[in-house]
Amino acid sequence: MAKTFVPTIVAAILLCAVMTLFSCTQSATQEVSPDPGRPQKGIVSGSATDAAGKPLPNATIVVNNTQFYNHNVLGETDAKGKYSLSLTPGSWYVRGTTKIRFDNKNYVLDLHPDSDAPFAGTEGAVRNLSLRIAGERTGQFGNDGFYGGQIEVFAWGLPTEQIMLNLQPVGNLLDGSTGKPITAKPQQSYLDNVPLGKYTVTASIGGQFLRVRVRNTGQEYGAAVTASFDPAYTGAEGRYKLNIEVSE
């Protein structure tokens, strides 16, 4: 009787051991995930964050082909601010935007890529983006100028280069950060790269205060005017401007 049951018992033990080993191997394989900081072939991935480094969900991601106009791949970041998009062969670069409600206005803001170098779709890449409301853009693929807003001064006969503008932030800036007062003279009628927000604006020449108003809004001139930025032109996204008229 003993000789009859020994092979059966041994076989059962061996089968159990094999099943246990197989189970452990499968579990280890499932836990392995690609390194999010390393490119994966045929995929561009990354994250989008706000000024405080927090995730930006639902940010729009556009992967543009460098060789063919209007040939792109579209996507959005998930709840954790991450994205991953499959690409075909070619040369590509990444752009991103996010929407913010501020001062009863809807803003579409460009995100800053940590690298604007083109990459091959077959090799893939990691491109992280962040929100900026001031600072210089990358200068690549049409991304010129500044993330900050532009103020244009209409002086109507007054020497624009002698006008001193004073901007006092009203509340937090568009990204939630604390603004700082700005005192500067426009260069050829323009003051560039002003952190996007709401300001009380005054103007003076040689210590004598001028009257100011926002252009084309039907306002009367006053000692000061409070306003936020508007699209640089009708339908513009990512570029914002404030037109200030001054008078004696």
Image (cartoon, rainbow, N blue to C red):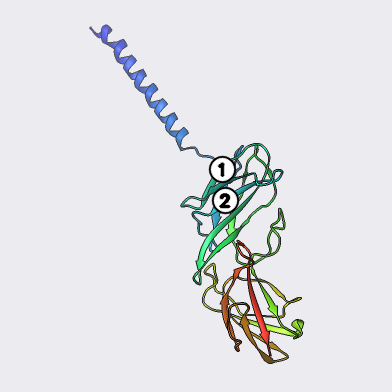
Q: Is residue 211 above or below residue 95?
A: below
Answer with left or right where residue 239 lies relative to residue 31: right
Contact? badges 2 and 1 (CB < 8 Å): yes
Residue, disc 2: 61
Viewport quadrant of the N terminus: top left
Using the image, tell me which numbered label, if any, was put on residue 59: none
Q: Residue at x 60, y 63 (%)?
A: 132
Please state the horizontal and vertical placement of residue 123, each as a whole percent of the image: 65, 38
Please state the horizontal and vertical placement of residue 151, each as a whole percent of the image: 66, 74
The residues tagged by marks 2 and 1 sit, at their Cα atoms, a distance apart of: 9 Å
The foreground one among 116 and 14 is 116
Please state the horizontal and vertical placement of residue 120, each as a whole percent of the image: 68, 40
Residue 140 falls in image quadrant: bottom right
The foreground one among 107 and 178 is 107
Answer with left or right where residue 204 lies relative to residue 200: right
Q: Is residue 108 above or below residue 217?
A: above
Q: Residue at x 55, y 54 (%)?
A: 48
Residue, disc 1: 85
The foreground one among 146 and 238 is 238
Amino acid at circle 1: Leu
Q: Is residue 114 above or below residue 219?
A: above
